[in-house]
Amino acid sequence: MEIVYFTLVGAGLYFFTHWALDRVERSRGARFKHRDLIFFGIILVLALASFQIIRRLLAGA
């Protein structure tokens, strides 16, 4: 069941990161030069944090 949680959260993080980066770029008025690296950095931090939270929650269950 853990893999299902990780997969769903990972998909959600992908869409959230895309949405958030798009919002920042729209407010800035231009695309970032290295958009893919910024996207990777955002999703990496969010994934590590959220997966750690999931593991802690499932360890207590």
Image: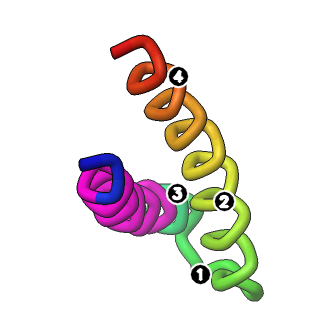
Looking at the rendered image, the quarter that the C terminus falls into is top left
Dot 4, how many residues are within 10 Å of its Cα: few (below 14), some (14-19), or many (20+)? few
Query: Any magenta on residue 5?
Result: yes
Question: Where is residue 14 drawn, in percent x and y?
Answer: 40, 66
Disc 2 on helix, strand or loop?
helix
Q: CA distance from mark 3 to mark 4?
A: 31 Å
The residue under label 1 is which amino acid type? Arg
Q: CA distance from mark 2 to mark 4?
A: 18 Å
Give the mark nearest the N terminus, 3 or 2: 3
Q: Circle 2 is placed at which residue position? A: 44
Q: Which residue is rendered at x = 33% and y = 48% of the image?
A: 2
The residue under label 4 is which amino acid type? Arg
Give the mark nearest the N terminus, 1 or 4: 1
The residue under label 3 is which amino acid type? Val
Q: Nearer the viewer, mark 3 or mark 4?
A: 4
Q: Circle 3 is placed at which residue position? A: 24
Q: CA distance from mark 2 to mark 1?
A: 20 Å
Any mark on residue 56, and which? 4
Any mark on residue 31, and which? 1
Tell me where residue 30 sits by quadrant. Answer: bottom right
Q: Which residue is rendered at x = 41% and y = 68% of the image?
A: 18
